[in-house]
Image (cartoon, coloured by chain):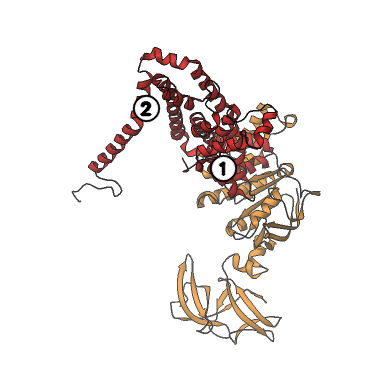
Chain colours: A red, B orange
Amino acid sequence: MSSRAFKNPISESAPVRLTLIFIVLAFLALFVLTPLLIVFKEAFGKGSGEYVAALQEPDAVSAIRLTLLVAAIAVPANLLFGVAASWAIAKFEFRGKAFLITLIDLPFSVSPVISGLVYVLLFGANSFLGPFLKSYGIQVVFAVPGIVLATIFVTFPFVARELIPLMQDQGTGDEEAAISLGANGWQAFWYVTLPNIKWALLYGVLLCNARAMGEFGAVSVVSGHIRGLTNTMPLHVEILYNDYNVVGAFGVASLLALLALLTLVLRTILETRYGSELSAGQKH
Amino acid sequence: MEIRVEKIRKEFDLYPALHDVSLDIKSGELIALLGPSGSGKTTLLRLIAGLEQPTQGRIFFGNEDASYKSVRERNVGFVFQHYALFRHMTVAENVAFGLTVRPKAQRPPKAEIRRRALELLDMVQLSGLEKRFPNQLSGGQRQRVALARAMAIEPKVLLLDEPFGALDAKVRKELRRWLREFHDRTGHTTVFVTHDQEEALELADRVVVMSQGKIEQVGSSDDVYDRPNSPFVFSFIGESANLPVTVEGGAVFFHGAPTGLSAQRDGAARLFFRPQDVSLADEGPGFTGPVTASRRLAGTRIAEVELGSSEEPCHVEIEVPLDAAASNGSVLSFRPTRWKLFY
């Protein structure tokens, strides 16, 4: 028997491990934890009374309301779209499938500012569609519809990207079984497909929602920054900050930070509990 | 329920998977579709089920033309290769699925559905496991849940795709015997796909041997093993050796030497025989060559003999008695006792 302890071939020595862990923790503290703490510190900088007042200020309330409204439209829309697209891509063979997948990924590769600009060019005052819609009393750019459109565009890959690999992996066997047992298409979807993808779907919706509420670039271009009307929370934060209203800016920012934390917690729960039922790999 | 497959042709993206296949299946029969991968056996099974549409041809269930009926309308019980059990449902819910998705008017009451599911689980000897989820079952148990689930819709026909493919050897053997008993008890017309000839020969009333999208032979185990009708069937089923020969004036010659065999038709042909169907012949015409390898196989010995010229040698394996002198390099002479020529 050798007197030397067995050395695991793929593990590093203790000092190396400790150093690496320390570096990672230091980075996390510096770049993630400190900014988060500063958000809350500044928000409560003049006491919790000021904090609550900042959030009850009419423009802030309007921004929160608009953000919730936009998310309430964009997220269900992308949920429907994401399920439909991944269903089509995973379960059927058709021409142009690869192109469709690329198209779904487009919002990830285009700068949000550009996507906002596209809507301005498409629906703005000098465009073809803008005046046409305006004659019917519909204002798209610098109004809520434009913000919703831009948000849908930017958040549109999240659900589909989460579902496509999972559904491709699951194949069509379960659906065939359901149909051979007498289920119709809707029953097969409702009783078999949906339960198979529910956790991945929830995960995708969560990410989609976080992005929908936090989107700045695309929304900033189409919004027009009208206080109390077309400002979402991220835009409102910027305006308040430029006005040197630190408590107000960080107060609203703290809500977004809370949303991020909540998303993170739910994400972690989903990943630890249902990791095997979420798509393997392909996490953003 | 009789099934008649009439000149079915199936193409996938212009690549033909089945060429004009016809097959009659009798009511209550247990039929095996046997062939190597790519022979079209699974495609044929899926066409019978209605999971694929034929490019040409028709399929009859009894006297009814079912060719363009959907899988829902055909009322077949299909057991998938990897079972396709619904993982979020319990065993009982899986079995009851076919009844729960029926339209309201035809759906039995809840208690009745449950009773039927438990009854089916009892039939496949899984009583007491109804609350488990599929991932809490062994492979053999999953297989039987899939079977019970397919039986729940009271199918006219039972179709099984590689039913034992994903199981280990011991469970395979048990389930094979069990399926035969199950079939004899329930009397369903049953078609199963397999690439395992032992499974097909042991289990089926008739075996359909397929190759490259065509049916090569249909017959009982004895038929396909003892009277193969094509070189493919002869070499696919069981062990066999084949040699190029010529027939002249009613006698069979190998490399110009008489073999002691006689045939009706003259011309070039291939001679097929099985390793055990030979007798050693020290005198007279026959096949003679040096032993290049020999191995002990349970109660017999297999000798590999090199025949023909040294430029193009043919190696055949024959069974020899244990006491025969068949060490490497010794010369053996033999004559096939049962053989067949394919021209």
> Residue pushed farthest front?
A126
Q: Nearer the viewer, residue B95 or B12?
A: B12
Residue drawn 70% across and 28% down? Answer: A136
Q: Nearer the viewer, residue A3 or A259?
A: A259
Count all numbered tags in the image, as a single digit.
2
Disc 2 marks which residue? A36
Image coords of residue A57 (percent x, y): 48, 15
Please, what secondary structure does the residue beneath circle 2 have? helix
Chain on which label 1 sits: A
Q: Which mark is residue A40?
A: none
Disc 2 to disc 1, C-alpha distance? 32 Å
Residue drawn 64% across and 40% down? Answer: A178
Q: Is residue B290 above or below residue B214?
A: below
The answer to whether one can see residue B18 in this image is: yes
Q: Amino acid at mark 1?
A: Ile
> Residue pushed farthest left?
A3
Residue drawn 56% across and 67% down? Answer: B239
Residue drawn 45% across and 81% down? Answer: B330
Image coords of residue B296 (percent x, y): 45, 68
Left or right? Give the position of A274 relative to B85: left
Q: Amino acid at mark 2?
A: Leu
Please, what secondary structure does the residue beneath circle 1 have? helix
Precedes in sequence: disc 2 or disc 1 = 2
The answer to whether one can see residue B130 in this image is: no
Q: Is residue B337 above or below residue B16?
A: below
Give the crowd class for mark 1: few <14, some 14-19, many >=20 residues within 10 Å. some
Q: Nearer the viewer, residue B210 or B9?
A: B9
Q: Which mark is residue A104?
A: 1
> Residue pushed farthest right?
B63
Image coords of residue B37 (percent x, y): 59, 59
